[in-house]
Structures are given as structure tokens and as C-alpha cells.
Image: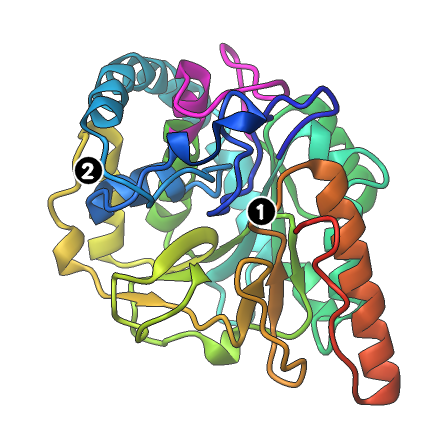
Amino acid sequence: MSNNNGGPVISVDDEGGDEKSCPSAGSGGACRLLHLPLDLRLGLLFAGLAVSCLLLYNSTDTLEYFRASYTSSRDSMVRFTSSLLSATDDLGKVLKAAAMEDGKTVILTNLNEAWAEPGSLLDIFLEAFRVGNGTLGLLDHLVVVAMDKKAFDRCRAVHRHCFNLPAKEMNFSGEAYFMSAGYLELVWRKIQSLGEVLERGYNFLFTDTDIMWLRSPFPHLYPDADLQFSCDNYDFGPADRRNQLNTGFTYVRSSNRTVEFFKFWRVEERVSNIEELQIRFLDTAYFSGFCQLSRDLSRICTVHANCCAGLDNKIRDLSIVLDDWRKYMDAGSGGWSVPKDCM
């Protein structure tokens, strides 16, 4: 995602194939990182961040930079822990109020100031639930985690379940370039907060705010998997780790394995128990996006503005997605006229 000045802005987005997380638009493939070990990929992707340059080549220099930056970010994460714990009572109340009928599943999204402004992605995101097929009731189970005060205030004005992630020492409303200290601090901060949700016994379905929910995704999730990820490109089977994962849409089931996974992740560079977890990748026929857009509107559940640089481009094309969807629902047939600006 880019701001109006062209610089990348930290966001809740995680999309392969675009250049928004590089310091300049002309960087192109020069910043891409494919074939990292899965645990490192998840460590950078998991929080639903703007990670457009992952999974593209193996760079020793980049990994060394990550490890060096990790130490500084981990220190900030330790300072943040006491701040988070002071707000856990509020978090518990929000999760309990938003839980589904099973009492242990919630939908989560992250929001910062840029995406919360009127007419920006938050409004389009909420509108998709209202025009989707059987998705309106899911808003009762959506928790919006605000990364700054303006985002929190806007959330409270338009939505029921909002949680203000405390930030005594860190400010995440402005720019944060890929792999910068501020970027990595946000990675660890989000991992901390998601781990807290799991420790409380809640399963969560994390969704980026630039994903349009058009049908309920829950019938198409795997009931026994520990971790499930959407994909930029789904070219193999659901258990095949060669799929190009995108954690903009991620389901995590609370269990001893996943709780320990997150605990270990907070204090170590590498996650040793990744092979113990059952991981599934979600078919783009149902969980689609601009990287690999399904043309079968009778099957599609979600549409992600991945492979798309620039907030304005996302807003325009996702607005067209909703217009196309309304026409399809009215006529019983139709197709997509996107991507346009997100080409």
C-alpha cells in the first residue's frame, strides 16, 4: 500500500507480487525474497502486513539483516509486553462479546489511520459484509484491532467490536518501510497480540481489510488444520507448501500446539516446531484475489486486492468488485470487470 506521496505505509495488507514494500517503485524484483524457510516466511507474513516482496528469492544478505534487526525489535517487544498485559481485560471483554455461537471463534482485522478514514478501505470492507450472500451476521463476530487512536475512534463510530492495541512507545500510524526497525516492531507486536487471543482459547480468522467477504468462508475451511492460509497463487494441493501463501486471510485453531508455536515465536528467530503443525492452503477458486482471480462467481467467497500497489487503486477496484457483485446477485449471472487500476 502506498501513501499519497508514493511511499509505502505500514498496513494490514500482505500481498505477493507488487512493489509497495520497496523503498521506491522502481525497485521491482530487486527486493524479492523467494524460497525462505517456511518458519521465516510465516514470521514476516503472519501478522497480515504489507509483505509484497517475500517468497521470491533466497537472499543471505536479507536474512542477515533480518536477524540483526530482530534483536532490536525483540527488545522493543519485551517493553511492549507489559503494555499489552495491562489491556488484556479489555481484550477479553471484546473477544467474549464477539465470539461465535461456539463461544471460541472470532474474526479479526487490523486497522491503521490511513485505512480508517471515511471513504477508505474500512468503509468498503464493512459494505462487503452487508451486500454479501449471508455475510451480514458475521459482522457481529468481527473484532477490529486498531493500531492507533484515530483508527480506534473511527472504528467505534462505525462498528461494534473495537480494540485499541496500546502503543506507549511505538507509533504505527505513519510510514514503515519493509524490513525497517519500525516494520519489524509491528510484526512482533501483532504476533504478541494474536498469541494472546489463542492463549485465551479463541480460534481466529484473520482477514486483511482489503478483502471483500462475499460468502461465508467457514464451510470451505479444513476442520482439523492448525493453520490455514490464503494464497496469491494456488497451483498445488491444499497441503503442498510450494503454494505461494498470503496471510492476509489466515485461520488459526487454538490448541496446545499453536499456543506454544506463538510463544516460541516471540523469543526465537526460528520456529522449530513448524513441522508439527498441520498447515493447509486455501484454493483461490474460493479465496481469490487479483493475483489469481477466480471467474466463477458461484463459488467465490472472498476477493483480495493483492498484487495491487497504492491505496487509491485498491479503493477503486474493490468498489468495482462490489458493483459487479451486486449486478451478479440481481441477475443471477455476470462476471468481473476487474482488475483495472490494479493491473
- Mark 1 Cα shell of 10 Å, populated few (<14), some (14-19), many (≥20): many
* Residue topped by disc 2: 264
Q: Secondary structure at mark 1?
A: strand
Q: Is residue 253 visible?
A: no
What range of the chain is rendered magenta? 165-187
- Residue 154 drawn at (x, y percent): 78, 34
Towards the viewer: 128 or 314: 314
Pointers 2 and 1 in contact (CB under 8 A)? no
Task: Give the mark nearest the N terminus, 2 or 1.
Answer: 1
Residue 109 numbered mark, or none: 1
Estimate the spatial distance between the alpha carbons at disc 2 and disc 1, rounded to whole Å: 23 Å
Quarter holding the N terminus is top right
Residue drawn at (71%, 46%), measured in percent from left and top?
Answer: 314
In the rendered image, which quarter is residue 145 located in? Answer: top right
Residue drawn at (60%, 83%), measured in percent from left and top?
Answer: 299
Q: Which residue type does callout 2 highlight?
A: Phe
Q: Is residue 339 left or right of residue 36?
A: right
Q: Is residue 14 left or right of residue 135?
A: left
